[in-house]
Image (spheres, rainbow, N blue to C red):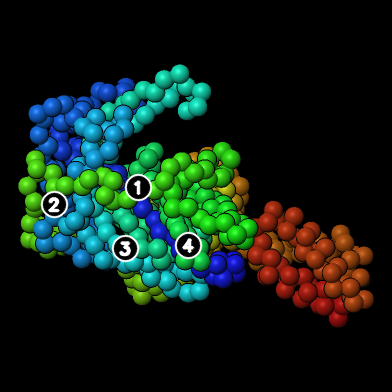
């Protein structure tokens, strides 16, 4: 969109990522798997903030934070330290959140995304560890509820807060950054992204160098894009009418797709940050080498490797590596003996589309079936149309196996003899079309071809059948 450049849109994002692959919470031994369990069943004096309870940092949480930091091309601090961020809210029983301030675990990173005009670098300001607060639950909607309930199962879930510089220039770029971050996190295996609230987004946005508004309560990536689009238009209209944008925190009302001002934006000093006296500073330099060694192959590297190693198209490699499971599926299929180019085309262009159409994931398709289908295509035993039909039948759970579908639907390509017989019959039965064709009506040929395809129930190679019809007609003319 053109207006965005003219209006100098600046967007920064703050992402709270639950490191929920960890078994225990960040400062106590309570489990992190609370989803679906009754409220307040995974709590202890530490995560309930009872007086005198002492936190102990989860070593693995620090390692996971370093892992994400490295994947975002960050520098890792030599020393790291926790701080108290003081504020009162019912979901925060201690009256302060243990988080980081100076000396975050990771800082000065960057991520390259596909921007509005080619590659675009988004700087990462920092990534720091903190504890998730509890969860407030309302009866019905928040404005109608007679009371607020508090569930502390979530209190103390390890969170990594990732803060970008305001380098994003449009809601679309913000969306692309979030998709890329999700992709990276998926490969790192630190978070189960299917769990509700595993990746939460706040966004700040300003235009024409004015004040920035921070938008909270964004629950999806699509929501982020919509909230930003709304907010940019709001600020623009405000400036056009001679007003000015207030520095404030706004709430995204998802149902109405608008943002609503809720409070003046706090300054850092409002929180009276000071070092957490119950946790010692950590020297983490020595941990970095080990974490780096364990770092898995990341999406960009895998995409480049797929192009290099298997010679597949860049566009296909991008689609396939855009989802970890799809990338693993592709590689398994190729290692299982399938031709990489055909596999890439069929997985990225056909299978992915059929899955999306049915709102299914790659897990609902067997690797062996894909290998078998590609084998049949490579050996020219079925037509492409039949290949698609087999995939659809399997996805709709209307066929047992590739072999049974092929035999039930009679999909094996037929021999020339059989096509030949069908061609002769079709010509015999459609003399008028033959005459029309001879008199220069080319489209009459399609009519005869249709008859041949009908007689062979679609198993004839259309190109071959067409050639045979032309040959047959000119033969009988001579
Ligand atoms: Zn606990
Ligand atoms: Mn935070």
Decide which of 124, 30 is in the foreground and name it: 124
Q: Quadrant of the C terminus?
A: bottom right
The first of marks 4 and 1 along the sequence is 4
Picture quarter with the N terminus? bottom right
Is the CB of mark 4 within 8 Å of ligand 2? no
Q: Residue at x 11, y 62 (%)?
A: 78
Query: Gap between marks 4 and 3, in whole Å?
Result: 22 Å
Position of residue 440 measured from the top left corner of the image (x, y, whole percent): 90, 77
Mark 2 and mark 1: Cα distance apart in space: 23 Å
Measured along the vertical axis of the image, is residue 163 above or below residue 119?
A: above
Q: Where in the figure is residue 249, as x and y percent of width and height?
A: 43, 47
- Helix, strand or loop status at disc 2: loop
Does the CB distance between marks 4 and 3 fall below 8 Å?
no
- Residue with the mark numbered 2: 81
Q: Nearer the viewer, mark 4 or mark 2?
A: 4
| Residue 359 visible within the image | no
Q: Which mark is residue 298?
A: none
What's the residue at 15%, 35% (across, down)?
Answer: 28
Seen as rendered, the residue at the extreme top is 146
Could you tell whether 187 is left or right of 253 in the image? left
Q: Earlier in the sequence, mark 2 or mark 1?
A: 2
- Dot 3 or dot 2, earlier in sequence: 2
> Which image quadrant for residue 163?
bottom left
């Amino acid at each position: 969109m053109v207006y965005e450049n003219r209006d100098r849109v600046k967007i920064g994002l703050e992402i709270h990522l639950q490191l929920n692959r960890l078994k225990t919470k960040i400062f106590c031994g309570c489990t992190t798997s609370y989803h679906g369990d009754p409220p307040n069943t995974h709590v202890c004096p530490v995560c309930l903030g009872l007086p005198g309870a002492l936190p102990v940092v989860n070593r693995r949480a620090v390692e996971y934070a370093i892992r994400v930091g490295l994947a975002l091309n960050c520098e890792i601090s030599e020393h790291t330290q926790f701080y108290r961020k003081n504020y009162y809210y019912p979901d925060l029983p201690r009256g302060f959140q243990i988080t980081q301030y100076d000396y975050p675990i990771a800082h000065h990173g960057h991520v390259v995304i596909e921007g509005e005009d080619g590659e675009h670098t988004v700087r990462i300001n920092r990534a720091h560890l903190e504890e998730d607060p509890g969860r407030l639950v309302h009866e019905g909607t928040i404005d109608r509820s007679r009371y607020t309930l508090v569930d502390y199962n979530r209190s103390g879930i390890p969170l990594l807060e990732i803060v970008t510089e305001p380098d994003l220039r449009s809601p679309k770029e913000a969306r692309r950054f979030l998709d890329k971050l999700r992709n990276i996190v998926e490969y790192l295996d630190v978070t189960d992204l299917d769990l509700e609230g595993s990746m939460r987004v706040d966004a700040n946005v300003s235009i024409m160098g004015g004040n920035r508004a921070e938008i909270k309560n964004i629950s999806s990536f699509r929501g982020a894009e919509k909230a930003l689009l709304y907010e940019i238009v709001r600020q623009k209209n405000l400036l056009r009418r001679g007003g000015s944008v207030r520095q404030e925190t706004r709430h995204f009302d998802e149902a109405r797709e608008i943002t609503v001002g809720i409070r003046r934006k706090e300054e850092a000093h409002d929180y009276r940050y000071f070092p957490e006296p119950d946790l010692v500073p950590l020297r983490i330099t020595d941990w970095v080498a080990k974490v780096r060694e364990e770092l898995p192959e990341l999406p960009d590297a895998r995409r480049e490797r797929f192009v290099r190693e298997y010679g597949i198209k860049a566009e296909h490699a991008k689609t396939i590596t855009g989802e970890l499971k799809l990338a693993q599926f592709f590689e398994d299929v190729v290692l299982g003996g399938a031709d990489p180019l055909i596999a890439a085309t069929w997985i990225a262009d056909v299978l992915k589309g059929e899955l999306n159409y049915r709102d299914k994931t790659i897990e609902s398709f067997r690797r062996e079936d894909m290998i078998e289908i590609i084998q049949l295509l490579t050996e020219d035993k079925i037509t492409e149309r039949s290949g698609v039909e087999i995939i659809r039948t399997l996805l709709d759970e209307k066929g047992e196996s590739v072999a049974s579908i092929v035999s039930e639907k009679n999909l094996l390509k037929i021999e020339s003899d059989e096509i030949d017989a069908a061609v002769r019959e079709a010509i015999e039965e459609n003399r008028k079309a033959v005459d029309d064709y001879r008199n220069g009506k080319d489209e009459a040929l399609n009519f005869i071809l249709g008859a041949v395809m009908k007689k062979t129930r679609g198993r004839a190679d259309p190109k071959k059948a067409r050639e045979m019809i032309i040959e047959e007609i000119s033969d009988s003319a001579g």
